[in-house]
């Protein structure tokens, strides 16, 4: 019987179905212990992870049986896809299954920042009734600048338009003639122009060498002092020291971060600010989003182990230890 190692907390009916066909070793805390992880992966034909397990070239080398790596989510920054490809291992993931959930969280925190909801909630529960202190602003008529107009950025744009916002975007890779840009008529522009014009800047970028610390003190200083910043993508696209300084100097009005440079983060100046909303990387964590993600990844892991083609793959659809470096992206 083929063996699948699950190194993070990934559950659901699709996972239960997998257990009926394969031996599933469910070790939700294994990602914390790299040496134990390397021992356990030796016998695995399949590996399923979320975003905490570091799937490095060294780990892949220590997994002689491995045919498929399943990433229960969209971001691939914790998987060395090149090393997996070199070993003929298929990487499957869930590129869009949680996009609606993340876009909805972005709308939720935009509204919460605009209406000072966390501070108003805390104050009211403590016995206050300070209506004037919690005068907010409307999203209606404001400019939303989306950095990264991919699957999540696009869905955020559609929802923001329903609130009467004007949407602009910066994306170094999107096709300007593509339907996601042309149909909703989203003007594309340089990052600096977007930062200057936006009332709210939201970031939906993957973490790459080009996006690491893209949002630094200098870039925050280009924003309006009344503007909000939202990051629900990857923590390291923000230089948190620069963000703290920009908030302290009132270069921007507030921020919401679902993701952090280091997760879990240390208690820092961000935790003490009323104009900052912090959540524990829950963008994708809805019942519906998780069901879609887990179903897709379990289905594709099973397909590869049974010799069939995966549907959502990052390198190639079938395992073949011989075909090194044959990426079919
Ligand atoms: C994703 O990449 O899909 C989300 O950030 C959720 C996750 O990492 O688990």
Image: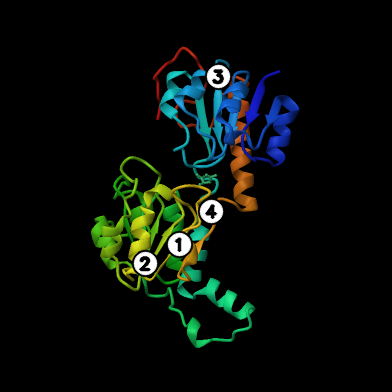
Which residue is located at x 66 percent, y 22 percent? 3
Say if residue 89 shows up in the picture: no
Q: Which numbered marker is on residue 6?
A: none
Direction from residue 91 to residue 165 in the image, left or right:
left
Q: Where is residue 224 shown, x and y percent of the image?
A: 30, 70
Say which residue label 1 marks: 270
Q: CA distance from mark 1 to mark 3?
A: 40 Å
Which residue is located at x 36 percent, y 60 percent? 243
Q: Count neighbours of disc 2 (C-alpha within 10 A) and say few if under 14, some if 14 to 19, many if 20 or more.
A: many
Q: CA distance from mark 1 to mark 4?
A: 19 Å
Which badge, 1 or 4, comes first in the chain's sequence? Answer: 1
Secondary structure under tag 4 reads loop
Kindly indicate whether the residue at mark 3 contacts the one at mark 4 (C-beta within 8 angstroms). no
Which badge, 4 or 3, comes first in the chain's sequence? Answer: 3
Rendered view: 6 above or below 161: above
Q: CA distance from mark 2 to mark 4?
A: 23 Å
Which badge, 1 or 3, comes first in the chain's sequence? Answer: 3
For residue 240, which quarter of the picture? bottom left
Q: Count neighbours of disc 1 (C-alpha within 10 A) and say few if under 14, some if 14 to 19, many if 20 or more.
A: many
Say if residue 54 shows up in the picture: yes
Say which residue label 3 marks: 63
Q: Note whether ligand 1 is within 8 Å of mark 2.
A: no
Secondary structure under tag 1 reads helix
Q: Which is nearer the eye, 110 or 126? A: 126
Q: Quadrant of the C terminus?
A: top left
Q: Which is nearer the eye, 118 or 142? A: 118
Q: CA distance from mark 2 to mark 1?
A: 9 Å
Secondary structure under tag 2 reads helix
For residue 40, which quarter of the picture? top right
């Amino acid at each position: 019987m083929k063996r699948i190692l699950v190194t993070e907390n990934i559950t659901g009916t699709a996972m239960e179905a997998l257990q009926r066909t394969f031996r599933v070793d469910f070790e939700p805390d294994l990602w914390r212990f790299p040496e134990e992880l390397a021992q356990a992966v030796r016998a695995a034909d399949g590996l399923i992870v979320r975003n905490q397990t570091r799937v490095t070239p060294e780990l892949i080398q220590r997994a002689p049986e491995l045919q498929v790596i399943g990433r229960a989510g969209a971001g691939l920054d914790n998987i060395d896809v090149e090393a997996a490809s070199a070993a003929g291992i298929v990487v499957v993931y869930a590129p869009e299954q949680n996009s609606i959930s993340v876009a909805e969280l972005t709308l939720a925190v935009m509204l919460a920042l605009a209406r000072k909801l966390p501070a108003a909630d805390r104050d009211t529960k403590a016995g206050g009734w300070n209506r004037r202190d919690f005068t907010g602003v409307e999203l209606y008529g404001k400019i939303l600048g989306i950095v990264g107009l991919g699957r999540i950025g696009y869905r955020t744009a559609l929802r923001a338009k329903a609130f009467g916002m004007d949407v602009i975007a910066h994306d170094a890779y999107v096709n300007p003639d593509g339907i996601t840009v042309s149909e909703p008529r989203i003007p594309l522009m340089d990052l600096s122009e977007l930062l200057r014009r936006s009332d709210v800047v939201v970031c939906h970028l993957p973490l790459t060498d080009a996006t690491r610390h893209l949002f630094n003190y200098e870039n925050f200083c280009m924003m309006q002092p009344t503007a909000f910043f939202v990051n629900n993508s990857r923590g390291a696209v923000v230089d948190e020291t620069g963000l703290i300084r920009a908030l302290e100097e009132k270069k921007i009005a507030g921020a919401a971060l679902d993701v952090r440079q280091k997760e879990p983060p240390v208690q820092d100046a961000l935790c003490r600010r009323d104009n900052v909303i912090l959540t524990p990387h829950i963008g994708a964590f809805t019942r519906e989003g998780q069901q879609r993600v887990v179903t897709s990844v379990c289905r594709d892991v099973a397909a590869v182990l049974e010799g069939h083609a995966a549907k959502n793959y990052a390198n190639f659809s079938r395992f073949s230890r011989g075909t090194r470096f044959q990426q079919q992206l």
